[in-house]
Amino acid sequence: MPQPLENATFTNSFVDELAGDPSRENAPRQVPGYHYSPVAPTPVAAPRLLEWSQEMGTELGLVRPSEQGAAVELLAGNRVADSMRPYAARYGGHQFGNWAGQLGDGRAISLGELAGQDGRRWEIQLKGAGPTPYSRRADGRAVLRSSVREFLCSEAMHHLGVFTTRALSLVSTGDEVLRDMFYDGNARPEPGAIVARVAPSFVRFGNFQILLAHDETDNLRALADYVIRHHFPELGAPDSPEVYVAWLTEIARRTAEMVAHWQTVGFVHGVLNTDNMSILGLTIDYGPYGWLEPYEPGWTPNTTDFTNYRYAFGQQPQVCLWNLTQLAQALTPLVPDPELLRPALNQYVATFNRSHHVRLLAKLGLTASNNEEADKQLVGSLLPAMEAAQVDMTLFYRHLSHLAPRLLAGELAEESDTELLRAASYAAPEAEGAAPLRAWLEQYAARLRQEPATPEAIRDGMLTVNPKYVLRNYLAQQAIEAAEAGDLAPLHTLHEVLKRPFDEQPEHEALAARRPAWAATKPGSATLSCSS
């Protein structure tokens, strides 16, 4: 039977099995020699439940809380249950390619773990619950703006099928938080909020990097063994270098599958520092993310990255390989011959290339053929054609799904091309840049006719992998502005629609529209920063 959160019993494997900081001083400081620091959330003025993930709550065996009450006090950090042992994890990382030293959970506090319906343990973490020893110069808080974005995107990505952390609740705090969104000297008070996010583990690449940087080999081994025992038990006991090599290989495989999925739904993470990389291959830390609207490999929504565009959409596969290389370096004390770790990185490349190709074929309604090179050429030539035609990635694939039966029937004509371009392009259908895409459609139609399935089956298969609804930044911004004004209806509606991204939902057709012209330059809709 589902139970109230305040009646749930937490376990605390991370705290029980790893090295904890003996100090209770909650002030910014270096914490050498430990995996975490015990720290309690800082209470807020007037917590109120704004949104709840019923799916995640059901998985955890929890009933939906009332708007206020004991459960919401726990989700806001105003209460700590007797079975909780809250902590902030210590980690480091490379930020924008540069070693940043100790970072750690500066505004996230883990409460402990609850058992899911299948017996798997889920860690619940409050983001925005107040300062920790790792907060550096920050206040440990989060604003409603960033919290809405984290809640919605966590759940939207899950329902798209992308590996991701989850969200359980969104709570307003009743406090105001001072934020300078674009670091331009224009700080303003914003309403505060806290997201309870959920994952089997929040351990990151950076948890291992900080231990290497401080020559803490015993702590490094202890953390690796903990992660393998709890999250990779299929690899067996962590008692040999071969197990650590197999573990890194599996991390690389999962990461590659995750990134391939990003690249085929048009998701841009925005800040792929090594401390934002999950050891489980989950999408983690939803900050300045976005979805491609005009297909543009060089695009990033993150203003902090506008100098080098290190984390642009087209750079994500290579950056994640670079990050995995840093993780491999961190694990070298556990493997006598570091060359043994190299095949894991090769596994990433092979898995990404295979998964990306297979996913793109599925989006086009194609199955693997005997002429793999021709298929790779066809798929590869589509992407620059999409860029030249300035097509909206989501709209293009969705409309192509409906157009496929007509192409199979031999109805390819200029009016079909124009119809597709009019529906999906941000440029005029007659624009010169559309020519490569028109030529590609002729090649595609010929290849599509080689498929043995019926036109209806091909269309229906495409519709199951080409979403109609994604969390466009302008939609999130509209929900944020309404919530800040006290209207939660757009937030609730958007949350519900994004649970069924592949369904037509004709009553919500407006949420599938292309980005309006005003959103192309509006802060929060087009550009964000690392504080977003």
Image: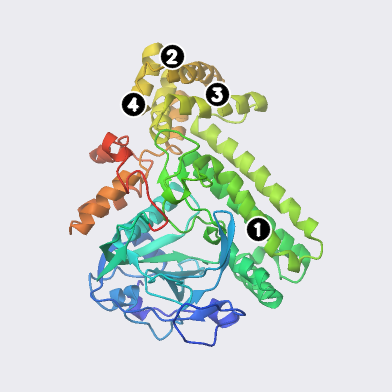
> What amino acid does circle 2 point to?
Leu
Sequence-first disc among 4 and 3 = 4
> What amino acid does circle 1 point to?
Gln
Q: Secondary structure at mark 3?
A: loop
**Residue at the spot 25% in from the left edge and 71% down from the top edge:** 175
Compute the Cα span from label 1 to label 4.
43 Å
The image shows residue 178 at horizontal and vertical percentages of 30, 66
Q: Tell me which corner region of the image, top left, top right, bottom left or bottom right, holds residue 226.
A: bottom right
Sequence-first disc among 1 and 2 = 1
| Label disc, if present, on residue 451 of the rendered structure | 3
Compute the Cα span from label 1 to label 3.
43 Å
> In this figure, which residue is indicated by the disc labeled 2?
412
Q: How many numbered marks, from 0 up?
A: 4
> In this figure, which residue is indicated by the disc labeled 4?
423
Sequence-first disc among 1 and 4 = 1
Sequence-first disc among 2 and 3 = 2
Q: Do the residues under discs 1 and 2 have CB atoms within 8 angstroms?
A: no
> What amino acid does circle 4 point to?
Ala
> In this figure, which residue is indicated by the disc labeled 1?
326
Left or right: 250 as drawn, with respect to 389: right
> Would residue 172 be visible to someone looking at this image?
no
Q: Do the residues under discs 4 and 2 have CB atoms within 8 angstroms?
A: no
Circle nearer the viewer, 4 or 2: 4
> What amino acid does circle 3 point to?
Glu
Circle 2: is it few (<14), some (14-19), or many (20+) Cα within 10 Å? Answer: some
Left or right: 209 as drawn, with respect to 262: right
Left or right: 100 as drawn, with respect to 76: right
